[in-house]
Image: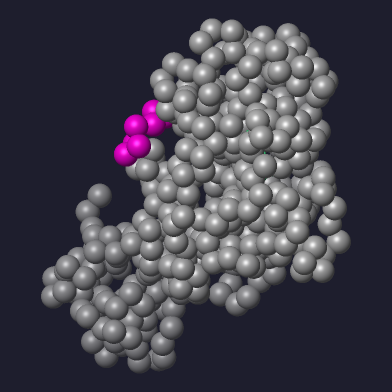
Amino acid sequence: MDGVLIKNLSSQVGSEVTINGWLYNRRGSGKIQFLIIRDGTGITQGVLVKQEKPDLFDTAKKIPQESSLRVTGVVEENPKAPGGYELQVNNIEVVSEAEHYPISLKKHGVDFLADRRHLWIRTPKQSAILRIRSEIELAVHEFFNQNDFIQADAPIITPNACEGTTTLFEIDYHGESAYLSQSGQLYNEATAMALGRVYCFGPTFRAEKSKTRRHLMEFWMIEAEAAYFDFEDNLKLQEEMIYHIIQRVLKNRRAELEVLGRDISKLEAVKLPFPRLSYTEAVELLQNKGREFNWGDDFGAPDETAISEEFDSPVFIHRFPTAIKAFYMKPDPQDEKVVLGADLIAPEGYGEIIGGGQRIDDLALLEQRLEEHKLPKEAFEWYLDLRRYGSVPHSGFGLGLERTVAWICGLDHVREAIPFPRMLYCLYP
Ligand code: 4AD
Ligand code: MG
């Protein structure tokens, strides 16, 4: 492919270049035309003056929005142009002329746009979000690589539940019941016993029955697990990872954050170490703020928001009541009513982005918990083996990618944090 990327125009001032892109918009008058061109890396304008090139000017006027184009011209600096550079156009090759484009540049309702998600992602804000999402993914891989973690992906089709039985997507696996994975954790625990420090990164599935701004049916989770890591080691790993992600996005994707109108000072305010509250302290905090909340209840979204308002950085809430947490969580040896689990709550009301903790490493206790949670022991025999053959203290966590993207980008809803969201009553496109 010949041509330069719009993001690299600054190094081409004075040269003639070709851009391979699409016509995003057109502005101007009868005398001068500005073709707003996008190529996925940025937006620039092609300038055409009628008097100088009357034929090309007239041809350009008729090109419909979102036609694909190869535009050739000389690069000039112009602080007023989108991106700071423009092209004095010498030639336009229309690669494919678009039909009448359904998304005009005026404001559309979100339902209208969601039904046309495959086109909506072409707009500057949506593509900025997807670039930031990609940057976050790269930051995650970089962080784990720097910290001696091996990526070991977990299966998507699984024989057992990990996070309760109420949100399982059941599938027919050659006549046997199987489920789409809710979490790779149990497999991470196995690979951690083989490789020491591991992470998996993939889609996870939950048949959530409620419609909220924070829930998807299919979301991507980054899950880490480390042998010989205790509860404290695990919290430290999480806060360092989040901090690393924020710093990398601030460094490489500032322009995208600006396109989104994100208040960047809020991200810059995130500092290590993150504050920590025990569940019991969090309950007191809520009660002192006048909220109705009893010890033993689980936090709802408004409770999480009320807690996060008190801090600039994400806040850990740890040592939850055993009854409201998953079967695999290790009881706190100091207080058996609570477990060594922690959630990380993002600032600005974005809610829980991480769930994690130390795992039960004792075979008898794990067997007892499976029974209490009415989980079928046969399906978990392989998992119990991990406690039979060289069990060690170990800990891990899962970070929800879309909630992290929503927080960093300042989005109202997780549906914009993934290219094609899967939500209750939304399977198309
Ligand atoms: O707190 P959760 O359920 O934890 C686990 O699945 C653990 N097994 C992870 C582990 O320790 N390896 O989910 C982890 C995170 C949540 O904090 C949230 O960010 C995200 O996954 N999440 C969702 N994101 C979008 N839509 C949903 N329906 C989500 N459910 C959980
Ligand atoms: Mg959770």
Viewer-side residue, 103 vs 13? 13
Residue, far left: 14
Q: Is residue 389 above or below residue 216?
A: above
The percent coordinates of residue 280 (x first, y second) are 73, 50
Q: Is residue 27 magenta?
A: no
Residue, far front: 334
The image quadrant that residue 58 belongs to is: bottom left
The percent coordinates of residue 385 (x first, y second) are 60, 9
Q: Is residue 72 above or below residue 243?
A: below
Q: Is residue 112 above or below residue 377?
A: below
Q: Is residue 15 above or below residue 29?
A: above
Q: Does residue 122 appear to the left or right of 42 in the view shown? A: right
The percent coordinates of residue 135 (x first, y second) are 40, 52
> Residue at the spot x=51%, y=66% of the render?
125
> Residue at the spot x=58%, y=32% of the render?
358
Viewer-side residue, 29 vs 41? 41
Tell me, yes or no, if residue 65 can be seen here: no
Q: Does residue 33 appear to the left or right of 161 in the view shown? A: left
> Residue at the spot x=42%, y=44% of the render?
140
Tell me, yes or no, if residue 31 can be seen here: yes
The percent coordinates of residue 2 (x first, y second) are 22, 54
Q: Is residue 150 magenta?
A: yes
The boundaries of the magenta stretch are 145-151
What's the image's color scheme?
one colour
